[in-house]
Amino acid sequence: MTQDERRLWLIEAMLTERSQYQGVEMPEDAEEQWLLLRALMNVRPPWPVSAEFIAMQDAYLQELIADKGVTDYRALEPVEPGIYLWRGDITMLAVDAIVNAANSRMLGCFVPNHRCIDNAIHTFAGVQLRLACAELMEAQGHPEPTGKAKITPAFNLPSRYVIHTVGPVVQGPLTDCDRGLLASCYESCLEAAATRGLSSIAFCCISTGEFGFPKDEAARIAVTTVRDWRGAHSSAIDVVFDVFKEEDYGLYQRLL
């Protein structure tokens, strides 16, 4: 089956799940079809899903990711022992675990085609990721506290795991509490990786998007916390600071 056929099959399957989708027309353009499929995945609640759907979705996403191009972090040059800096799409990075900047519900972003990292990770991992997160949150029984972390399989992503952490939301002047909570995010993620025996982790720029943490201070906290944690634990975990914007790349370059 071709990618075009898989995409159409998946869209039709998801449109039939809800009666209000009956009037939705299928776009003719392949890119518009992909945006529709992604939107449907983004808004889909953590409902059970058939093995047939999973097989079709996985085949589609894995070929899509392969076509976009996967980067193995081990092909990068470290900027200092055990620490790497890379500018690129974290969903295309082959590493033991990538870090997701989640919200306290821990179920992913429900805004169709939103360009946040939470949305991207859930999109390319597949609908199984929301189901896995929902199971964890149901067992926990309350929203995820800021500064903590949870680990799930990465499903269709090139990484093996996703570590989800909730960063602080900055409203008004930056406080020491904000700084401490952000540092706790990095420590919690590293501890989760160490507990699983992982050898590598890639961090996004936690809290610097819609959560409003100043980028320069967030980068300083990230680098300092990672260095201190690795030193205190004599850790052999390789750390990748993954950035998407040129501005962030420059900040980390100066710090490293």
Image (cartoon, rainbow, N blue to C red):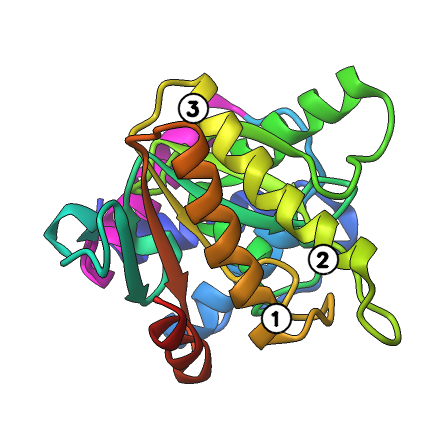
Is 84 placed left or right of 250 in the picture? left
The disc, 2 or 1, on the residue closer to the chain's N-terminal end is 2
- List the residue tagged with mark 3: 194
Q: Determine if residue 2 is in view.
A: no
Magenta run includes residue 157: no
Q: Is residue 120 above or below residue 210?
A: above
User: What residue is rendered at 59% in x and 58% in y?
Assistant: 206
33 horizontally vs 177: left or right? left
Mark 2: which secondary structure?
helix
| Cα distance between the residues tagged 2 and 3 | 23 Å
Q: What separation in Å lies between label 2 and label 1 (alpha carbons)?
A: 8 Å
The answer to if 67 sits in the magenta stretch is yes
Can you tell which quarter of the image residue 134 is in?
Answer: top right
- Crowd tier of the residue under label 3, counting other residues whose Cα lies within 10 Å: few below 14, some 14–19, many 20 or above: some
Which mark is nearer the camera, 1 or 3?
1
Task: Name the residue tied to disc 1.
Answer: 217
